[in-house]
Amino acid sequence: MSASKNSAADPTSVFPTSNIDPYSDEFLSNPYPYFEEIRSLGPLVRLEKYDCLVTADYGVVNEALRNHEVFCSSGGVGLTNFHKEKPWRPPSLVLETDPPEHTSSRQILSKVLSLPALKTLRDKFEQEAERFVSEVITSGAFDAVTDLAEVYPLKVFPDAVGLPTQGRENLLPYGSMVFNALGPRNHLFEVAFENAKPVQEWILFHCRKENLSADGLGAQIHRLAEEAGVPEEKACLLVRSVLSAGLDTTVNSIGSALYCFARYPQQWQALTEDVSLARNAFEEVIRFEGTAHSFYRTTTQAVTIAGMAILEGEKILVCLAGANRDPQKWQQPDQFLISRDCRGHAGFGIGIHACVGQMIARMEGESVLKALAKRVKTIKLAGEPVRRFNNSLRGLASLPVEVELI
Amino acid sequence: MVKVMYIEADGREYEVEIAAGDTVMQGAVDHLISGILAECGGSCSCATCHCYVDEAWVTKIPDPSDTEEDMLSAVEERKPTSRLSCQITMTDGLDGLVVRLPESQY
Ligand code: HEM
Ligand code: FES
């Protein structure tokens, strides 16, 4: 079959097939060769094992995510089709809905999490980053994941949301459940859900207005929701979205940032010479090491994209991290370059569902990189990094490093 | 296709063609015009796509939404012609639009 012979007027509904398993350990430890293989097969490929489509092509990813009417999110952004099967928890009012419901929930979160709204938090985020960094670098060797990438967000993020100090150990396990649940019911899912009940109870308890501090982001969400006439139960679900998506994502991204710099010493040197590159450097980390590497969409009607005819009700795995390395879009896609113009990358998503928490994520990433670049001359691997396996999040469980101070 | 002219703070001018239906922000990003950062990719939550719409065009563009208004209240150097370029969708009626970009987006 030759896809190239098909003009737009004559779309094909015969997709190239592949036996790639995006939930295998091999794929999850290094998906990039697989993204390349998928792209080489075509812009859209059928995954035999899960009977869904997959794309790692920037053009298709971009077009599909912008066309949210056809490529919808209410069918769930994981493998499970909510239109056919019951989800494991009440669906998210933002991530897993379509307009008009999506629009009203999104507006509330967007107001609370926008860059201008976060200005008052910036000093705090920077000070804490400096404190954590100066503590951790004194010994010259540390685990960049457990000693920095986990503890820093676990301090500043719940503080900002307005959670009590007690019980924060539930946050990462909850995030792990949420992101693993986007995949199949495999061993990763089982392990994540082993101790699910108390974790879920703690999270749901802390989504309630009376259990959040009066001035945090959580309370602000409740306040705006009330003003907009949104019932309290729904406001709790909006807080739940922030608790679900707000921590594991930044932890893994900060860990990946350190991993990038340990492998690309020249890039670290460039950052120490010009600390103002920190914000763009973090952006390049998100492009290069896609933390949230893929989400699904479900078609609401038959549609033609890239000359391929997709039927209604089809699940499509949209590989953001694949799009972020597509040579059609990026020059030297497999190089980590902190001065690159990475605007338009898909690492925070594209279109109406693009990450609503990305400003807080950047603030964390930038603060940590800045604090480190002011103090640390070199970062070297001091042992084998250990990958953290999750069905839809990419990151490390451990990253031993040695640093030389300035 | 419709034309948009971007004028950077240092005076450099870029005239580019973009598809009707695309936003002014998208046009800048696609053509690597550096004065627009557009960190949030157009979801009206970063205000780093701030621009000044040329006087002659101001009334041809629909008024900002409440959300855009909120964001605009926080930009540096706000002027009466300030808009977020991700909220301006190009139409045939806007063919030839001129926008000026601020010195800094933060
Ligand atoms: C570096 C860290 C982060 C990355 C890489 C990331 C990535 C993403 C991506 C790719 C999406 C789009 C999902 C889709 O299109 O289906 C998304 C959505 C979302 N993110 Fe993030 N995220 C990060 C941090 C955060 C933080 C800190 C928060 C909360 C404060 C957050 C809250 C959300 C929410 C609520 C959505 C759903 C938005 C919607 O559907 O309209 N994220 N994120
Ligand atoms: S691109 Fe972020 S507000 Fe316009």
Image: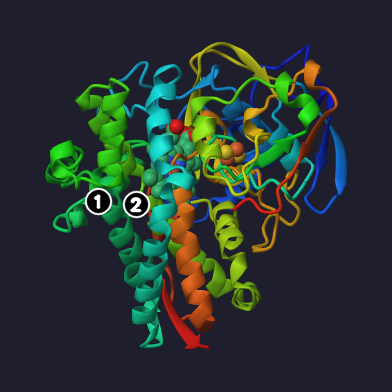
Disc 1 from disc 2: Cα separation: 7 Å
Question: A93 or A88, which lies in front?
Answer: A93
* Rendered image quadrant of residue A341: bottom right
Question: A176 or B63, which lies in front?
Answer: B63
Q: Residue at x 43, y 36 (%)?
A: A110
Q: Residue A400's spot in the image, x, y percent? A: 40, 76
Question: B91 or B64, which lies in front?
Answer: B64
Q: Residues within 10 Å of mark 1 (few under 14, many from 20)?
A: many
Query: Numbered disc 2: what chain?
Result: A
Q: Residue furthest front?
A: B80
Q: Which residue is mark 2?
A: A247
Against A354, residue A293 (above or below) is below
Task: Inspect this view and state whether residue B77 appears.
Answer: yes
Of labels 1 and 2, earlier in sequence is 1
Task: Inspect this view and state whether residue B41 appears.
Answer: no
Against A267, residue A363 (above or below) is above
Looking at the image, do the residues carrying marks 1 and 2 touch, with CB atoms under 8 Å apart?
yes
Indicate the amino acid at tag 2.
Leu
Against A262, residue A313 (above or below) is above
Q: Which residue is mark 1?
A: A171
Q: Residue A245's spot in the image, x, y percent? A: 36, 44
Indicate the amino acid at tag 1.
Leu
Badge 1 and badge 2 in a common chain: yes
Q: Residue at x 36, y 52 (%)?
A: A248
Q: Give the secondary structure at mark 2.
A: loop
Q: Give the secondary structure at mark 1.
A: helix
Q: Quadrant of the image for the N terminus of chain A?
A: top right
Q: Residue at x 77, y 30 (%)?
A: B55
| Side (left or right) of A130 relative to B16 | left
Query: Numbered disc 1: what chain?
Result: A
